[in-house]
Image (tube, grey):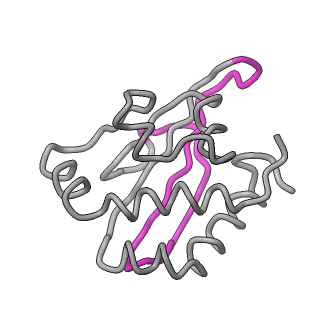
Amino acid sequence: MASFLSKEWVTCLVETLNNNLEYSRAARDFEARILLEVLPTGAFSQVRCLYLDLADGKCRKANVIEDASSVEADYTFSGTYAKWIRIVTGKMDMNQAVFSGEFGLRAEMGKKRELWSNYLRAIYMLGDCMTRVPTDL
């Protein structure tokens, strides 16, 4: 098991995404730079972000960063550490988190429209793949 957002955890997430047939199908023509922003809560005291470069059902690159402004992202999903742990443990899915207001989503309006019109399943499967990474909480 690896700690959430550790190098080992991110490596395992990339492998899970790249080997998951359902994610691959859902994201087959989806190309985006996504930032998963983890906001402080409780003992988690600093902002950390996971940058994902996704294309054609695969993850080309993944990095944990501390400064969200250091990368360009098409979509930024933002939530507290406690809410991300709910995703990782399967208690909430990514779409549910955004639609319920538990997560923020920052993107240009056209990009949001494209995401919700064409790639809801891809975002759902991204969160589902996160649940498949053995995580030490």
Q: Decide which of 34, 16 is in the foreground and name it.
A: 16
Depth check, front residue: 136 or 70: 136
User: How many numbered marks appear?
Assistant: 0
Residue 21, above or below 23? below
The quarter of the displayed image where residue 27 is located: bottom left
- 67 horizontally vs 75: left or right: right
Q: Quadrant of residue 82?
A: top right
64 drawn magenta: yes
Above/below status of 66 relative to 58: above
Which residue is the extreme one toward the top?
Answer: 42
13 horizontally vs 76: left or right: right
Residue 90 at what x, y percent from top left? Answer: 63, 48
Give me the residue at 43% from left, 32% from top. 103
Residue that appears at 42% across and 41% down: 96
Q: Percent position (x, y) of residue 63?
A: 59, 57
Say which quadrant the C terminus sits in.
top right
Where residue 26 appears, x then y in whole percent?
A: 38, 73
Instruction: Indicate the position of residue 95 as horizontal and vertical percent values.
Output: 40, 46
Residue placed furthest toward the front: 91
Above or below, 68 relative to 130: above
Q: Image point 69% across, 62% down: which residue?
A: 132
Q: Quadrant of residue 31?
A: bottom left
**The one of 91 and 117 positioned closer to us in this rendering:** 91
Q: Is residue 6 left or right of residue 1?
A: left
Q: Where is the N terminus found, in terms of image quarters?
A: bottom right
Q: Which residues are magenta?
A: 42-69
Q: Is residue 2 left or right of residue 32?
A: right
| Residue 5 vertical placement versus 99 (above, below) | below
